[in-house]
Image: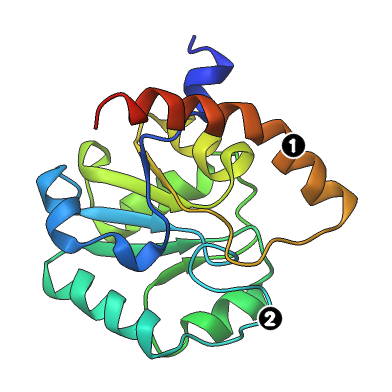
Amino acid sequence: MKSLSKLLMPDYYFEHFYDITPEFLLEKGIRALLIDIDNTIAPYEVAEPDERIKTWFASIKAAGISAAFISNNHKDRVELFNKELGLYAYADSGKPSTKTLIKAIEDMGAEKEHTASLGDQLLTDALAAHRLGIPVIIVPPIKDKKNLFFRSKRLIEKPFMRKFHKLNSKEK
């Protein structure tokens, strides 16, 4: 069994989702991407994708990369956000459970070996991806919630992100 550190450690880190290029994904062998919505692609209060989001998804699609939303948020939120994009979309996914991730990979006709996850949380997004055996790309939260639950989660994540940055700063 993998250690908690390996389960929570990101494989890749970007400052913004839109910094992740189709070229990067293809270079890493990624042909399908499982994407969190809230604080990864848009803040909670943004109901629909803006032009930057639409453009990024168009570039992903043009490169032949499949995408699906895997969200722990509710159906109404996910459906409204996905309305214009028309991706596979799964609400109330229960991450870090892998059940919805597996279903999304199957529905997209993707191969697990060529799939990655994109999110902002180590305790949900990274843990689910690594439990399934796929790489995870982490971005910092766009606009983090400040309630006790989220502050506690970020406090738990902090040493893992510090370790990731320390290990990766040596490679540059």
Q: Residue sitting at 44 percent across and 26 percent down?
A: 166
Q: Count how many numbered circles sit on residues in the image.
A: 2
Disc sitting over residue 99 in the figure:
none
**Does residue 161 appear left or right of residue 158 in this picture?**
left
Q: Quadrant of the C terminus?
A: top left
Task: Please give the residue where the numbered disc 1 appears in the rendered image.
Answer: 155
Name the kind of residue labelled 2 in the image. Answer: Glu
Q: Is residue 159 positioned above or below 21 on the image? A: above
Labels 2 & 1 near each other (Cβ < 8 A): no
Image-quadrant location for residue 62: bottom left
User: Which type of secondary structure does the marked residue at label 1 adopt?
Assistant: helix
Question: Residue 160, how many percent across, how many down?
Answer: 57, 28
User: Which type of secondary structure does the marked residue at label 2 adopt?
Assistant: loop
**Does residue 18 appear left or right of residue 27 in this picture?**
right
Image-quadrant location for residue 13: top left
Q: Is residue 10 positioned above or below 83 on the image? A: above
Disc sitting over residue 45 in the figure:
2
First in residue order: circle 2 vs circle 1? 2
Q: Nearer the viewer, residue 42 or 97?
A: 42
Name the kind of residue labelled 1 in the image. Answer: Leu
Q: Residue sitting at 58 percent across and 65 percent down?
A: 142
The mark lying in front, picked from 2 and 1, is: 1
Question: Residue 89, how many percent across, how many down?
Answer: 47, 68
Q: Nearer the viewer, residue 150 or 61?
A: 150
Q: Residues within 10 Å of mark 1 (few under 14, many from 20)?
A: few
Question: Residue 39, how many percent across, how many down?
Answer: 59, 64
Question: Residue 5, how many percent across, how many down?
Answer: 54, 19
**Does residue 69 appear left or right of residue 44 in this picture?**
left
Q: Is residue 69 positioned above or below 118 on the image? A: below
Q: Residues within 10 Å of mark 2 (few under 14, many from 20)?
A: few
